[in-house]
Image: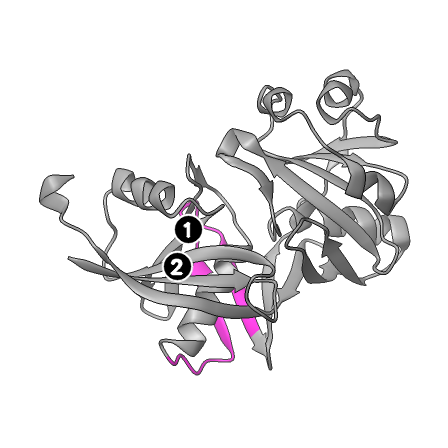
Amino acid sequence: MKIPIYQVDAFASEIFKGNPAAVCPLQEWLPDQVMQNIAMENNLSETAFFIEDGDVFQIRWFTPKAELDLAGHPTLASAHILINEYKNNNSSLIFKTKIGDTLNVSINENLYLMNFPSRPPKVVNDTSNIFEALKKNPIELLAHRDLIAVFENQEDISSINPDLEKLKKLDYPSVVVTAVGDNSDFVSRNFAPKLGIPEDPVTGSSHCELIPYWSKKLDKKEMIALQISERGGKIHCTNNNDRVLIGGEAVTFFRGEIDLNLKNI
């Protein structure tokens, strides 16, 4: 069995930037452990698998260690592959997740706009464990799916060098650090060692939490965010109450095939 595979740099306008994601279009679902093994073999922060189901695409995402309930950059990457490799001419694409959420991705020239659920974070009062892990005290600590530590300025975010082993012990899949940006509305970084990702280059799904927080804080509906990892990425953000728009560009890095023999797995 040959499985097509693509690698896409999401939230980037040129290769070697943004966040690389693997995308595997399927005719039918592979066994869960096989998809997990493919993601582990790819050794990227996330691998997306999708199948066509009428007018929608069923989609699932795996890190090298676990399946996710929501992922941004591999969804953007999947839309990019459908438009550019499979010549889907629709101006918008509908993805269905394993847990039943509907994700709409619209295309505006080179920009892919993902319509995701808003996940406003709530205040967390105990900051002791996060101080030990980040070696800095945040001015505010919040959480939804991720733990979000807010700092004074962009320099605080750039200089953070966390203790990844201590981050693994926290009760959250990832820890996001964020502050007002110097040349953008806000900046962030995302650490997810518990999921096998020491630092995620650009994280679409964490902006489901960051957008409602910063929209309220800055009193702005539309914002530009930068994730200031080593590779870096630019995120176009819109707050629409119970939904958020997360936008970015994407470029294809390679096309290939996985030679898969299920009898030997």
From the viewer's perspective, is 221 left or right of 119? right
Question: How many numbered marks are there?
Answer: 2
Q: Residue at x 43, y 77 (%)?
A: 84
251 drawn magenta: no
Question: What range of the chain is rendered magenta?
Answer: 87-106
Q: Above or below — where is 163 with respect to 239?
A: above
Instruction: Answer with left or right where residue 81 lies relative to residue 212.
Output: left
**Where in the figure is residue 114, as x and y percent of width and height?**
58, 63
Near mark 1 (Cα within 10 A), the count class, few <14, some 14-19 or many ≥20, is many
Q: Residue 123 versus residue 175: which sits nearer the camera? A: 175
Q: Quadrant of the N terminus?
A: bottom left
Under mark 2, the amino acid is Val
> Which residue was labeled with disc 1?
47
Q: Are marks 2 and 1 in contact (CB under 8 Å)?
A: yes
Measuring 33% from the left and 40% from the top, which residue is drawn there?
36
What label does residue 17 carry, if any?
A: none
- Horizontal side of 202 relative to 265 (left or right) equals right
Q: Which residue is at 47% across, 41% downward?
A: 68
Left or right: residue 127 versus residue 263 is right
Q: Provide residue 59's location: percent of width, then percent of height.
A: 40, 55
Task: Name the image quarter holding residue 85.
Answer: bottom left
Question: Visible in this render: residue 145?
Answer: no
Residue under label 2:
23
Q: Nearer the viewer, residue 1 or 218?
A: 1
Spatial CA distance of label 2 from label 1 is 6 Å
Q: Quadrant of residue 147?
A: top right
Marks 2 and 1, the one that precedes in the sequence: 2
Residue 96 shown in magenta: yes
Amino acid type, label 1: Thr
- The structure residue drawn at horizontal position 85% and vertical position 53%, both measured from the top left corner, is 181
